[in-house]
Amino acid sequence: MLIGIDASRAAYPQRTGTENYSLFLIRALLAQDTENHYRLYFSFPPKPGLFPAAPNAEIRTIPFPRLWTHARLSWEMAKRPPDVLFVPAHVLPLVHPRHCVVSVHDLGYLHYPQAHTRWGRWYLHWSTGHNARTASHIIADSQATKRDLTRNAQVPPGRITVVYPGHDPSFAPVREPARLNAVRERFGIPGRYALYVGTLQPRKNLGRLMGACAMLAREGDQVHLVIAGKKGWLHRSLFEHTRLLGLEQRVHFTGYVPQQELPALISGAAVFVLPSLYEGFGLPVLEAMACGTPVVCSNVSSLPEVAGDAAVLVNPLDTAGLARAIHRVMTDKDLRRDLAQKGLERVKGFSWEKAARQVSTILLSAAAT
């Protein structure tokens, strides 16, 4: 069987959640399925070595200046369609094979439309509806996303399978003082720090996180806040907010941090904080747990599914409650030890190998219907 995969997002040089999802899931599929043939479609040549060489996989680079998915990939589907097309991190092309599977990561734009631009809301609404109407089967990252698809996109539950993502196996506790000090020096972090990793955008609720940091500062807590991630839409107000709160010396924006440097940055944090208003899954929570770092995260959407009892869950709209949770984790050694141990144990249940086995079954089933 010929399985086509839109691998374009996996080749991005600065990958975030959905791009890493695409990369590691495709790698796992190629590693374990040697019976079927894979054709990976790229909008630009992938970096050499991004995917392991496999006799049953081919790379098809089809560059195009605009509308790559709906123009160039559609043309490819019309001329040389695979038996089934899998789109792990974007939207199905307008022209597509009869059998196709797509991953839908979240419907956060429905819950917090103000956290998106008008164009972003329109495109997310259109692309989600297009995927829902067109796909033979839909993969959801969480039960929360599956509920949203059934309630808001009217997708029958039988057409949706929840497949939990895994985490990059390179994420593990870093204990070497030299590595920890090097990352601290590189980003100018002067003391103990709470850490956020992710794109800078309103849905991540960073304004309230900085407000919690300001509360702790007023009470004499010396915590620093490190915000690591590339700039997303509507991010500019965050820098002004830092100035208005008087946190210029307490909040450190690192910009995008390469994947290979994140384990040391996360391992060196006293607490990892993900206060998002909505997450389809929340890969950074898994990565923090894998590094043995205690986690504070929101008690909404998919995050309780991911964190279980291995994190302190808080109402993301309660700034004071967020401040209390951060302070508690940073000062209670027993709690920190307990969360770290539970996190390391819980993360064992999330692997890309397990996800790939489930996705492979879905692809073969979709092609056979």
Image (tube, rainbow, N blue to C red):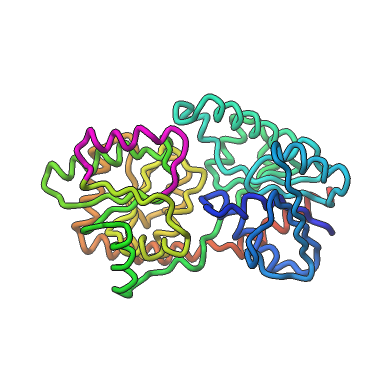
Relative depth, front residue between 23 and 14:
14
**Residue at (24% x, 41% y) in the render:** 212
Magenta span of residues: 229-248
Q: Quadrant of the N terminus?
A: bottom right
Whether residue 369 sits left or right of residue 314 in the image: it is: right
Q: Quadrant of residue 37?
A: bottom right
Locate residue 337 relative to residue 21 in the image: left or right.
left
Residue 232 shows in the view = yes
In the rendered view, tell whether residue 276 sits above or below residue 186: above
Q: Is residue 164 visible?
A: no
Residue 348: x, y in percent?
49, 66
Q: Nearer the viewer, residue 120 or 131?
A: 120
In the depicted view, which residue is nearer to us: 159 or 246? 246
x then y, percent, for residue 44: 68, 52
- Residue at image point 48% right, 53% down: 283
- The residue furthest top is 118
Q: Is residue 355 above or below residue 201?
A: below
Q: How many numbered circles does the render carry? A: 0
Percent across and percent down for residue 338 are 30, 63
The residue sitting at 39% across, 62% down in the picture is: 343
Residue farthest to the left? Answer: 220
Looking at the picture, does residue 314 appear above or below residue 269?
above
Residue 147 at x, y = what percent?
A: 57, 38
Q: Tell me: 171 left or right of 216.
A: right
Q: Is residue 23 magenta?
A: no
Q: Quadrant of residue 136?
A: top right
| The furthest residue to the right | 79
Q: In the picture provided, is 38 more to the left or to the right than 334?
A: right
Q: Give the quadrant of residue 65.
A: top right
Residue nearer the viewer, 179 or 175: 179
